[in-house]
Amino acid sequence: DGGITQSPKYLFRKEGQNVTLSCEQNLNHDAMYWYRQDPGQGLRLIYYSQIVNDFQKGDIAEGYSVSREKKESFPLTVTSAQKNPTAFYLCASSISMGGTEAFFGQGTRLTVV
Amino acid sequence: RKEVEQDPGPFNVPEGATVAFNCTYSNSASQSFFWYRQDCRKEPKLLMSVYSSGNEDGRFTAQLNRASQYISLLIRDSKLSDSATYLCVVGNREYGNKLVFGAGTILRVKS
């Protein structure tokens, strides 16, 4: 089946640790995105990538890093510099940027313990 | 002013009711518009795209008013299963080339 796969579904991080969230898509989409959602709030854009080997900061990039070495993969690292990382993280992809609908993975729920 | 604004609700309606949501956007150069549905603790899923001429999909009708910069979603004959958060999404190839999500409107359909 074509789609977007995020892993893990649940992740627990100790304070001071870096963790990496996986996002893989087999839809042959050029654009990929990472969003963060806090309880009762909308989606906020962390990073996005229009094409392989290129990515741009979104609205809340501080404390996060990404890479886009392959078209299918867009992993997100939550670093120790992110002071409030507990949230629901959603990865999405679209055929291209801006004009086309995005499709989401099932999300990763990150909790700091 | 937020780029995309929605009434957060919640809208509490009985089964069978008709309910309408509005969404306003600030960037007049926006070119693409969508409604997404998000169930509790799940990922958003595309409900429908919104076209200039308006479009309908079963009980759902979406309208776009470019002059007033708002988008609407009408749900007829509400079902219990329609209970969810509805997200308005706007895209603009020039505006950072990204999709911007509203915070969502909560709908609760009760029997």
Image (cartoon, rainbow, N blue to C red):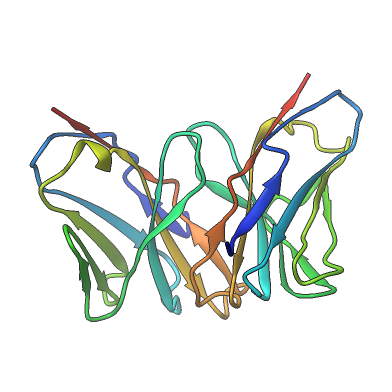
Q: Is residue B44 left or right of residue A10?
A: left
Q: Quadrant of residue B28?
A: bottom left
**Residue A15 versus residue A93: which sits nearer the camera?**
A93
Q: Is residue B36 left or right of residue A71?
A: left
Quadrant housing the C terminus of chain B: top left
- For the point 60% across and 78% down, the residue is A96
Q: Quadrant of residue A29?
A: bottom right
Q: Is residue B54 left or right of residue B34?
A: left
x and y percentages locating residue A82 in the rendered image: 81, 37
**Residue A90 versus residue B66: which sits nearer the camera?**
A90
Is residue A29 placed above or below A18 in the rendered structure? below
Is residue B106 placed above or below B37 in the rendered structure? above
Q: Quadrant of residue B61?
A: bottom left
Q: Is residue A5 left or right of residue B94?
A: right
x and y percentages locating residue B81 in the rendered image: 26, 39
- For the point 59% across and 61% down, the residue is A3
x and y percentages locating residue B53 in the rendered image: 22, 81
Question: Farthest residue in the top direction?
Answer: A113
- Number of numbered labels in the structure image: 0
x and y percentages locating residue A9 in the rendered image: 67, 37
Is residue A49 placed above or below B14 in the rendered structure? below
Question: Farthest residue in the front direction?
Answer: A1
- For the point 89% across and 37% down, the residue is A18
- For the point 60% across and 52% down, the residue is A105
